[in-house]
Image (cartoon, rainbow, N blue to C red):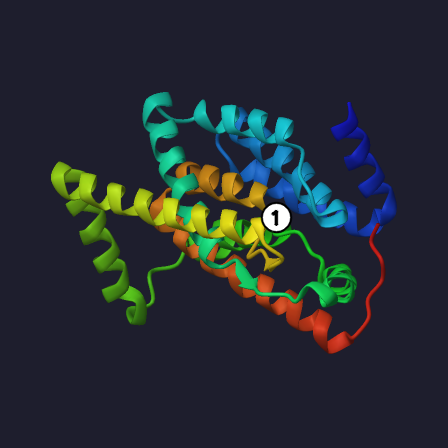
Amino acid sequence: MGYITKVHEAICKNKLAIVVYFSITVGMSLHQSTLIESGIIFLFSGMILEDFYQQTIDMRAFLVLLILMACTKSFGWFFSLFILGVILFRVIFLFTTKIKTTKVENISTNLKTDMEQIERISCGYLPSLGISWFIYVFFVSTLDIPSLFIPTHEGIVFFRDFFIHNILASGIAFSTLCLIWALGEYRLHQAKKGTNKIIYGFGDGDVFILGAFFTFIGFEPFLIVFFLSLVLQAGWYLIYFLRGDFHDRR
């Protein structure tokens, strides 16, 4: 019930923008072939609104989203890829997290400055991911791969097929990924124990969202969606910095 209340509050903030947004949502829903996929789109739309206004997501809603996504695939295969995706994006999360040593006497001043900066540029990641998914579905998926990216695409397909059909190589790659993950977690744990200033690359919840879409959309389409979302996110932050101020959304 709390999740529904948060979404309702977000909708009441800017009704015109939300009407346009949900018109896009309905368009994407009608573009899908199954009722479950339409439900995924509507639920994800609510999560986007919550993330945009609150910079957080309700993990209970995410669990429902994950179950709906799993219903469109083989359960065993889906959750195997989901775990792989979560580990992969957790590694990216850990190694995009910046750790800076802070002197004890400057902690209060630095904390205040950091909070002001976070307040100034705060923007959830899900809106960028949602817009990127919309762009992919209606504009990119119907186009041929640009000739410039054909070698990259062929390389991705080659490595994907190689690891799928080579158990030993897959085991070595997965073990290496887990080792890198463990080293990253240790680095972050040590930083939290000290007086370091930690600037996270993106939110903890985003790791699970990315892992779910990595599995649901498919490896190759998701690479395009993920790349577009990074471009949009960078552009969003650039606008914030150029404006110098912004309207409080909360």
Amino acid type indicated by mark 1 = Leu
- Residue depicted at 23% across the width and 52% down the height: 157
Report x, y in % for residue 212. Answer: 47, 37
Which residue bears the numbered disc 1? 126
In depth, the one of 45 and 202 nearer the eye is: 202
In depth, the one of 187 and 216 nearer the eye is: 187
- Residue depicted at 51% across the width and 29% down the height: 66
The answer to whether residue 187 is above or below residue 41 is: below
In which image quadrant can residue 166 be found? top left
SS of the residue under disc 1: helix
How many badges with numbers are in the image?
A: 1
User: On the picture, is 247 further left or further right than 242?
Assistant: right
Report x, y in % for residue 234. Answer: 58, 67
- Residue depicted at 51% across the width and 38% down the height: 208
The answer to whether residue 38 is above or below residue 185 is: above
The answer to whether residue 224 is above or below residue 43 is: below
Quadrant containing the N terminus is top right
- Residue depicted at 65% across the width and 72% down the height: 238
In which image quadrant can residue 47 be found? top right
Report x, y in % for residue 165. Answer: 13, 39
Report x, y in % for residue 199. Answer: 60, 59
Can residue 225 be seen here? The reply is no
